[in-house]
Amino acid sequence: MERKLRLAERGRELLKQRGIQGVIRPVPYKLALPIIEHASLEDNDELQDLWANLLVSAVDPEFKGVIRSAYIDIIKQLEVIDVHILQFVFDSYNKWVVGRQQTAIAFGYYFSPIENPVGKLEIIDRLGIGFAAYEDSADN
């Protein structure tokens, strides 16, 4: 029950942060029920927050993406280290893209963001994890 209450509170916080008020988008039961079930069983706050974000995206009337049932299978397989690595890669890539775009605009050339700006040694170093932990996460 404690985890369900935390999920509800986190969901309210995320709705408020996104400025979502009033009418929300209905979520099909085949998505809503497994999201709520897995989120309620999750002991780790960071992992539960992933579920809360997925649920809030699903009810957000302004969200233009598609919430696929595959996301449920992906999130339920993640460990905290996987989330940290994915977040680090995502943040590094976004920072790299913004820098490259600014350079491209300044010098008037076309920029295509297809490179990977972060490698495993940087991830291991910045997150303070071992090589084996990185490899296990990458395999996952």
Image (cartoon, rainbow, N blue to C red):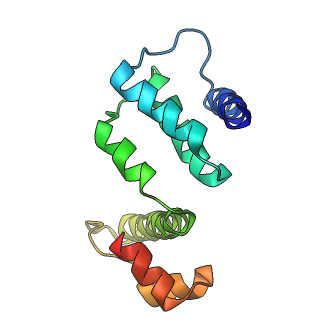
Q: Residue at x 53, y 85 (%)?
A: 124
Residue 53: % across, % down: 54, 39
Depicted 95 relative to depicted 49: above or below:
below
Query: In the image, is residue 124 above or below residue 109?
Result: below
Give percent across and percent down for residue 28: 36, 19
Farthest residue to the top: give it.
Answer: 23
Which of the two residues, 96 or 57, is positioned nearer the viewer here? Answer: 57
Horizontal side of residue 92 vs 27, given as left or right? right
Quarter that holds the C terminus: bottom left
- Residue drawn at x 38%, y 75% as measured from the top left: 138
Of residues 115 and 106, the one drawn nearer to the viewer in this rendering: 115
* Residue 22 or residue 35, whichever sits in front: 35
Left or right: 7 with respect to 74? right
Quadrant assignment, res 19: top right
Report the front residue among 122 and 10: 10
Let me know if residue 37 appears in the view: yes
Residue 80, position in %: x, y?
A: 56, 63
Q: Image height check: is 109 above or below 44?
A: below
> Is 57 above or below relative to 93?
above
Q: Residue at x 59, y 21 (%)?
A: 20
Residue at point 36%, 72% (across, down): 107
Residue 118 appears in the rendering: no
Left or right: 73 as drawn, with respect to 9: left
Q: How many marks?
A: 0
Task: Quadrant for the N terminus, please.
Answer: top right
Residue 19 relative to residue 123: left or right: right
Residue 12 in picture, x, y percent from top left: 68, 26
